[in-house]
Image (tube, helix red, strand yellow):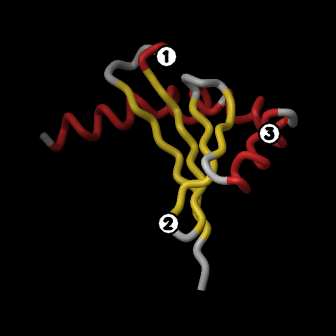
């Protein structure tokens, strides 16, 4: 069978919004074909199919929604992630 999955991640070294990077990576059969990065601010394709999808997403509402991911997903949860990690160390 074939496998499609999406991985969202937050990388941070403080709880300040400027110190957080949000990435959203799309995979098909273990090959990343497109990624959104908050530091770039748009989708980037890594395969022929990914490049076409990145162009379509960058010209549609998907890029605006993804740009809000850093605030919506990461910033709101950094305190939870940090607290959880510090209490277990």
Q: Which mark is residue 30?
A: 2
Disc 3 and disc 2: Cα gap in Å? 22 Å
Sequence order check: which comes first, mark 3 or mark 1? 1
- Helix, strand or loop status at disc 3: helix
- Would residue 86 appear left or right of 9 to someone viewing this image? left
- Helix, strand or loop status at disc 1: helix
- Would residue 86 appear left or right of 1 to someone viewing this image? left
Q: Are marks 3 and 2 in contact (CB under 8 Å)?
A: no
Q: Is residue 47 above or below residue 17?
A: below
User: Residue 86: x percent and y percent?
Assistant: 20, 34
Q: Which mark is residue 17?
A: 1
Residue found at the far right of this picture: 60
- Would residue 77 appear left or right of 32 to someone viewing this image? left
Between residues 31 and 41, which one lies in front from this camera angle? 31
Quadrant the C terminus occupies: top left
Judging by the rendered image, the residue that carries numbered circle 3 is 55
Sequence order check: which comes first, mark 1 or mark 2? 1
Identify the residue shown where x is 58% and y is 74%. Answer: 3
């Amino acid at each position: 069978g074939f496998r499609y999955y999406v991985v969202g991640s937050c990388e941070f070294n403080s709880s300040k919004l400027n110190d957080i990077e949000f990435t959203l990576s799309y995979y098909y059969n273990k090959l990343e074909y497109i990624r959104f990065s908050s530091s770039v601010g748009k989708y980037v394709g890594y395969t022929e199919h990914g490049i076409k999808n990145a162009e379509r997403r960058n010209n549609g509402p998907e890029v605006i929604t993804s740009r809000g991911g850093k605030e919506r997903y990461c910033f709101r949860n950094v305190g939870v992630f940090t607290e959880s990690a510090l209490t277990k160390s």
